[in-house]
Amino acid sequence: MSSSCCIHRPGVISTIILKTEDVVASRNLHREAFDEHTQEKLAIYKDYLEVFLRVFMNTTRVARIQIFDFFAGPGSDPEGNPGSPLITLSSVRKIRHETPSCQAVFRLYFNEIDPNKYEQLKARLAEEIPDNSLSIQTDCLDFPEAFNSQFPTMDRSANLVFLDQNGCKQVSKEVFGKLAGLQMTDTIFFVASSMANRFRELKEIRQHLPLIDSDFEHMNGANVHRIITAAYKRWIPKGRQYYMGSFSFRKRSNVYGLVFGSSHPCGLDKFLTVAWNHGGDADFDIDDDHLVPDELCLFEEFNKPKKVALFQKALSEKILAGEIRTYEDIYLFSLEFGCLARHSQEGLKKMVSDGTLQRQKFAVSYAAWTKQEKRPILFPEADSR
Ligand SMILES: C[S@@+](CC[C@H](N)C(=O)[O-])C[C@H]1O[C@@H](n2cnc3c(N)ncnc32)[C@H](O)[C@@H]1O
């Protein structure tokens, strides 16, 4: 069964095409107030959205900035806490106010399949102060249909695509590949990762994910989302540079998380900065660090999150093996590991103090990476490496 309608008023275009049988029964996140994990997920989305807006609003060559929220929900929870659509609207307004010189056109797109939630969403958006300079489109469509209708508009714009799906099946290989193939497009998507670890034998789950048998060898209840994020790299179209990061959440025994992808290292750098402001790459002790702020030890080495210590060890090994030779290589390796330039700087300083490297100014940053000339890492003169 399906029905459709179109409503037009200034600044808002609405389309409803419903296939009732496609409304899959699943847990309704919006029946209760958002829990702390949902709030954290939305806070990361908001923080990254604002960084994204600042970057592209200060880039004169960008004529159009679009935000796509394909699983938008009703706008807020029953207690009025804003969901992703209201967060998007208020952040766009705030950053535009801060950047009056920006000439770019803004377009916000919200889709929600559930007709009740969709009506609530429209009502919530209508309560907001009218702003004809913003184009807002809402749809009540099944995701594949909404995505296919919007994908052609993503060419030549700066786009942030938020895919807050319920489980894991909507971000298919085709959808992922199409998004990864775009320029100036960052994507954040949700994956209910625990299911992959729990039901590893189930074809129904595995078929939607890029996992292969060997991924399960080291998978456990804590690292499952990290492993799934790494597996999505298999779906990057051949020959394409694509930069990915992740953030895991734990709710009781379930781990789920966000996957981030960008066509540009600057996007990943900024996402990781946001993620480290929220605790690293998880809101729980993913590496079993047992770090409690009040019980920090006198020896700095024992206080460092295991991820950073592991990264610095791997970096040092790769430099000594000659696999990493320039500051630019260091920068990209840091991002790939989910660490920041500052984490590499700390590790490099240690290599200077133990005499492995010559004293030098380590220009490891996005700005340094953009320079044409590749700068080699300097070893002590006697070292012939
Ligand atoms: C996790 S919630 C999104 C929450 C939203 N980001 C917020 O902040 O409130 C997922 C939403 O996607 C909707 N949904 C589920 N399947 C969908 C589909 N196939 N196409 C579009 N929306 C869908 C659900 O009704 C639900 O409101």
Image: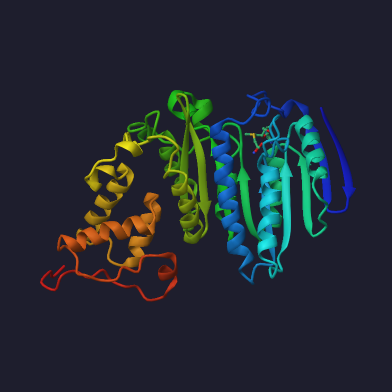
Is 96 placed left or right of 8 in the picture?
A: left
Q: Position of residue 289 (x, y in %)?
A: 31, 36
Q: Observer-nearest residue: 193 or 90?
A: 90
Q: In the rendered image, is residue 168 in sight?
A: no
The tally of labels here is: 0
Q: In the rendered image, is residue 265 in sight?
A: yes
133 vs 281: above or below: below
Residue at image coords 37%, 59%: 341
Residue at image coords 63%, 24%: 27
351 vs 212: above or below: below
In terms of image quarters, where does ligand 1 lie? top right
Q: Quadrant of residue 374?
A: bottom left
Q: Quadrant of residue 304?
A: top left
Q: Quadrant of the C terminus?
A: bottom left
Q: Position of residue 316 (x, y in %)?
A: 23, 56
Colour basis: rainbow
Q: Position of residue 152 (x, y in %)?
A: 70, 55
Q: Position of residue 214 (x, y in %)?
A: 35, 35
- In the current view of this chain or complex, which residue is farthest to the left? 382
Q: Observer-nearest residue: 330 or 54?
A: 54
- In the current view of this chain or complex, which residue is farthest to the front? 294
Residue at image coords 58%, 63%: 55
Q: Quadrant of the N terminus?
A: top right
Q: Observer-nearest residue: 241 or 116?
A: 116
Is 133 placed left or right of 309 in the picture?
A: right
